[in-house]
Image: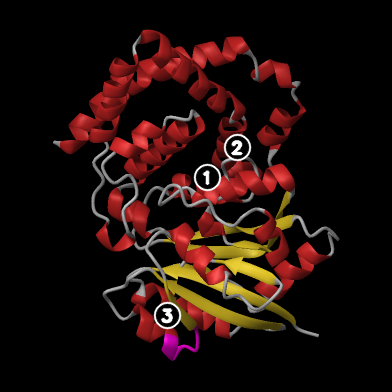
């Protein structure tokens, strides 16, 4: 008997991208779908395209978290799936397989996500994209993002209180943390294709650096950064070449305003987050050696076998704090200025 699933897609000016996703959804087998497009005020043909494809369209205030919460309130089925408009399903049985994978766990407090495959328009940066794809399959902290899809029971979603909408972004990271704290994550079969357009339009290095800075400020609890940062996450239709210098300059200004003691305390918290991500260099080594050794994660396995105290200790945190401060306000700041010119 086919399972039933409400698919929720937040969109603003996504007429071109959403056409392909809606076609993929229509081709899914062994599943009954309710497709809801939560439009945040599109000025293009997003609404018309979605309705022509048979999707339900609801109007919402802009903001991905707000849009998804609004649509979830209209969902009819027990399973919810949240997807970005530029996502592409890679198998006609992907959603049915995902629900079967989650259902067999036997606990309603489980959520699924897909590993990514980036669809690119330009060549180059092959290692960068291979690394992001490998990272998306790990289910580790800070590695699960909204573009990987999110499948969960409506009951669990409502227990968590829906998406946190205090900021117009990072709703996916807050949801990921809430799921990990009160339930568990499960990697679902098949990959989810996603557009690399934001990386390509803004610049791979610049976008990734800003993402890292955003996560550092979020993890270290520095809300004034987001209050004063100039549009840290623009709508897709507004993206252009990203200039990182204003964000580094803002960070320097905040550190001066905080004073030495408070700035060092924040830097210490940021270094603690970096220490918790010690697995990432090991994964990068695995990806670099993949053409020779294949897809087995030898370095990652070595990292996980090491005693926690070897990498996660105050000495390592102190070293990372000093190195990080020197790098951000030295070579990184210089690189940003040279890139601007």
Disc 2, disc 1: CB below 8 Å? Answer: yes
* Residue at figure coordinates x 66%, y 76% from the top left: 5
Q: CA distance from mark 3 to mark 1?
A: 28 Å
Looking at the picture, does residue 61 appear above or below residue 333? Answer: below
Q: Which residue is mark 2?
A: 283
Disc 3, disc 2: CB below 8 Å? Answer: no
Numbered circle sitting on residue 204 = none
Q: Give x and y (percent) for residue 252.
A: 29, 22
Colour logic: secondary structure
Give the quarter of the figure containing the N terminus: bottom right
User: Is 147 placed left or right of 332 in the picture?
Assistant: right
Q: Nearer the viewer, mark 3 or mark 1?
A: 3
Q: Which residues are magenta?
A: 51-55
Q: Nearer the viewer, residue 159 or 36?
A: 159
Q: Residue furthest left?
A: 341
Q: CA distance from mark 2 to mark 1?
A: 8 Å
Label 3 vs 2, first from the N-terminus: 3
Q: Give x and y (percent) for residue 250.
A: 27, 29
Q: Quadrant of residue 226?
A: top left
Residue 233 belongs to the span the image colors magenta = no
Q: Nearer the viewer, residue 10 or 190?
A: 10
Q: Quadrant of residue 91?
A: bottom right
């Amino acid at each position: 008997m086919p399972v039933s699933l409400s698919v929720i897609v937040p969109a603003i000016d996504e007429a071109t991208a959403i056409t392909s996703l809606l076609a993929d959804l229509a081709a899914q087998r062994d599943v009954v779908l309710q497709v809801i497009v939560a439009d945040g005020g599109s000025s293009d043909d997003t609404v018309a395209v979605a309705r022509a494809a048979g999707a339900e369209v609801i109007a919402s205030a802009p903001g991905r978290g707000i849009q998804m919460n609004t649509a979830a309130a209209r969902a009819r089925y027990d399973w919810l799936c949240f997807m970005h408009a530029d996502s592409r399903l890679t198998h006609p049985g992907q959603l049915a397989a995902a629900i079967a994978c989650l259902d067999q766990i036997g606990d309603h407090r489980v959520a699924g996500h897909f590993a990514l495959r980036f669809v690119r328009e330009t060549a180059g940066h092959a290692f960068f994209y291979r690394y992001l794809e490998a990272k998306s399959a790990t289910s580790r902290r800070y590695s699960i993002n909204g573009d990987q899809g999110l499948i969960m029971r409506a009951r669990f979603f409502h227990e968590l209180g829906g998406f946190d909408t205090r900021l117009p972004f990072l709703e996916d990271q807050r949801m990921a943390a809430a799921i990990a704290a009160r339930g568990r994550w499960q990697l679902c079969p098949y990959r989810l294709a996603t557009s690399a357009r934001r990386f390509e339009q803004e610049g791979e290095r610049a976008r990734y650096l800003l993402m890292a800075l955003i996560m550092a400020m979020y993890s270290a609890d520095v809300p004034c950064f987001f209050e004063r940062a100039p549009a840290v996450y623009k709508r897709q239709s507004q993206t252009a070449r990203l200039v990182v210098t204003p964000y580094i300059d803002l960070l320097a200004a905040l550190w001066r305003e905080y004073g030495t003691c408070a700035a060092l305390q924040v830097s210490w918290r940021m270094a603690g987050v970096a220490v918790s991500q010690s697995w990432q260099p090991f994964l990068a080594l695995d990806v670099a050696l993949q053409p020779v050794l294949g897809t087995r994660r030898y370095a990652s396995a070595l990292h996980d076998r090491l005693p926690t105290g070897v990498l996660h200790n105050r000495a390592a945190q102190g070293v990372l704090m000093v190195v990080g401060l020197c790098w951000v306000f030295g070579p990184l700041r210089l690189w940003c200025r040279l890139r601007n010119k």
